[in-house]
Amino acid sequence: MVHFLHTADWQIGSRFGQFSAEEAALLGEARFEAVEKIAALATERQVQAVLVAGDVFDQQTVSDRVIRRLFGALAGYAGTWVMIPGNHDAGLAESVWTRAAALDCVPSNVHVCLKPMVVEVGDCAVLAAPLAQRHTMDDVTAVFDDMATAPGIVRVGLSHGCVAERLPEGIEATNPIAADRCARAGLDYLALGDWHGMFQIDDRTWYSGTPETDRFTNNASGMLLEVRIAAPGSVPEVTPHRSSKYTWQRWDETLAVASDVDVLAGRLASLGARDVLMLKADGGVDLAGHRALEQAIETAAARVRALRHDLSGLRFLPTDADLAALGARGGYLAGAVERLRAEQEIPAERAAATEALLLLARFQQALGARQ
């Protein structure tokens, strides 16, 4: 029985530029915690090895401290680690990997494969095909076809790239991998990285995805895979494990009536400290609805790990009462309000026109309060 964990795309050192510095720091810290969880699970499950299919680091320029911290996070598992470079941390002549070697911080139980090679772990042969550059049009796994291993041993491939015409549309076409590589090379399992969600190509070919979710996509991310192979030729038994600390969600909402705002506010109130949310809203609301939505967003933002929102598609549709408050039943102000309402129907002008109407409403409200 061969028993190992398959993980990939740790992206250590990711900057999370769309978030505030505080939020980015906490999201980055969660990636180290994910590695510690992997080490703990490997020890708990008594696996023979942990296979890391590329993009251990998010970029070549991470600091020395980040490199040391990453290898320190492996301490919870004393067994064999096998790592390869991916496209973000490709095995260049000068790379994050050569810096790690110079720092002398790579533990002796960690095999960093900077070139195609076979790493034997008990009765399992790990065939490694790393990326030596960020992008290539060659299938680096073709070397597996000619890699010899001892008779009666389980053959496991480890690589990073795109299985041609099998991943969802939009995935990069560089770093291609043949969909039938297992059959061609006589592999019992092919452990892949690059796609950030867990994805099964066939019985023997899997993407583990990133262990800590990092994107607003519904792609089964935040997982790692526990793999058992009874004997050479046996179909692998693959067990997913959730490892992500944070749950990333994207909500695209259309608001039409007051109750829509109430429902959305209730959903926002249900979020907690482990949620990361991107909210995009369109449709139309009156002044009370817009204020209620803003309040719900501000309250949720103080409670969740991170919240980004886009209300640029949401129109302000003033009621008669709103117009009365604006003093817009006649005269110059009425004309200005009508022009802004018309501009809200133009997609390119909608956000600015809506903001102008809301500012006008707030100004009039503040003015009325002082009178």
Image: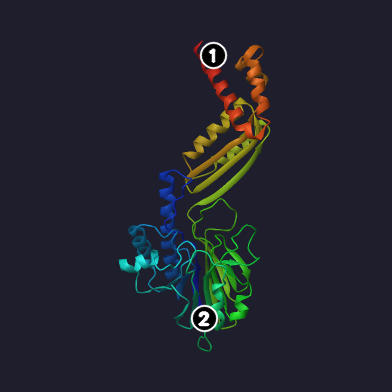
The amino acid sitting under disc 2 is Met
Classify 263 as above or below 17.
above
Residue at (52% x, 83% y) in the render: 147
Q: Nearer the viewer, residue 352 or 293?
A: 352
Residue at (55% x, 17% y) in the render: 364
Classed neighbour count for the residue bearing mark 1: other residues with Cα under 10 Å, few (<14), some (14–19), many (≥20) = few
The amino acid sitting under disc 1 is Gly
* Figure coloring: rainbow
- Work out whether residue 240 can be spotted: yes
Q: Nearer the viewer, residue 144 or 277?
A: 144
Q: Quadrant of residue 195?
A: bottom right
Classify 258 as above or below 188.
above
- Work out whether residue 231 can be spotted: no
Q: In the rendered structure, which disc, 2 or 1, sits on the residue that comes first in sequence?
A: 2
Separation (CA) of disc 2 from disc 1: 78 Å
Q: Nearer the viewer, mark 2 or mark 1?
A: 1
Q: Quadrant of residue 21?
A: top left
Q: Which mark is residue 368?
A: 1
The residue tagged with tag 1: helix, strand or loop? helix
Residue at (63% x, 32% y) in the render: 350
Q: Residue 271's spot in the image, x, y percent?
A: 53, 44
The residue tagged with tag 2: helix, strand or loop? loop
Q: Which residue is mark 2?
A: 1
Q: Residue 64's spot in the image, x, y percent?
A: 33, 59
Q: Which mark is residue 17?
A: none
Classed neighbour count for the residue bearing mark 2: other residues with Cα under 10 Å, few (<14), some (14–19), many (≥20) = few
Q: Residue 180's spot in the image, x, y percent?
A: 63, 75
Classify 90 as above or below 29.
below
